[in-house]
């Protein structure tokens, strides 16, 4: 399950999706994934400085859109 793509997002939601704790510093340098309708699944890395909560919108800590990811994939396809 990815973080919702809009609206207010609580840090508890972010932590339930990613599992890196309740401090922004726990996310620095971590890889995230999102689905781009024009390009498919994309990935990025959280920056090493303060970043807005909106950066979590639509993101997940696993590639949940691609069933070829691994045995822990919960894509539901």
Image (tube, rainbow, N blue to C red):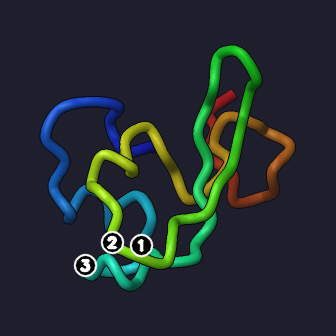
Q: Give the SS element for disc 2.
A: loop
Name the quadrant containing residue 49.
bottom left
Q: Mark 1 — residue?
A: 19
Query: In the shown orientation, is residue 30 left or right of residue 68?
Result: left
State how far apart marks 1 and 3 are (Cα): 9 Å
Name the quadrant containing residue 17.
bottom left
Q: Judge depth for marks 3 and 2 and give the one in front.
A: 2
State how far apart marks 2 and 1 are (Cα): 19 Å
Name the quadrant containing residue 16.
bottom left
Q: Which mark is residue 22?
A: 3
The crowd level at tag 2 (other Cα within 10 Å; few <14, some 14-19, many 20+) is few
Say whether marks 1 and 3 touch (CB < 8 Å): no
Tell me: residue 17, above or below residue 1. Answer: below
**Quadrant of the frame with the N terminus:** top left
Q: Give the SS element for disc 1.
A: loop
Given residues 18 and 23, the one toward you in this image is: 23
State how far apart marks 3 and 2 are (Cα): 14 Å
Q: Position of residue 12 (x, y in %)?
A: 20, 64
Residue at 58%, 76% in the rendered image: 29
Q: Judge depth for marks 1 and 3 and give the one in front.
A: 3
């Amino acid at each position: 399950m990815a973080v919702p793509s809009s609206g207010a997002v609580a840090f508890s939601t972010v932590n339930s999706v990613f599992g890196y704790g309740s401090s922004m510093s726990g996310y620095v340098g971590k890889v995230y994934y999102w689905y781009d309708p024009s390009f498919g699944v994309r990935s990025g890395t959280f920056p090493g400085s303060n970043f807005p909560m909106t950066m979590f919108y639509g993101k997940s800590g696993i590639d949940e859109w691609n069933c070829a990811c691994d045995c822990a994939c919960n894509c539901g396809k």
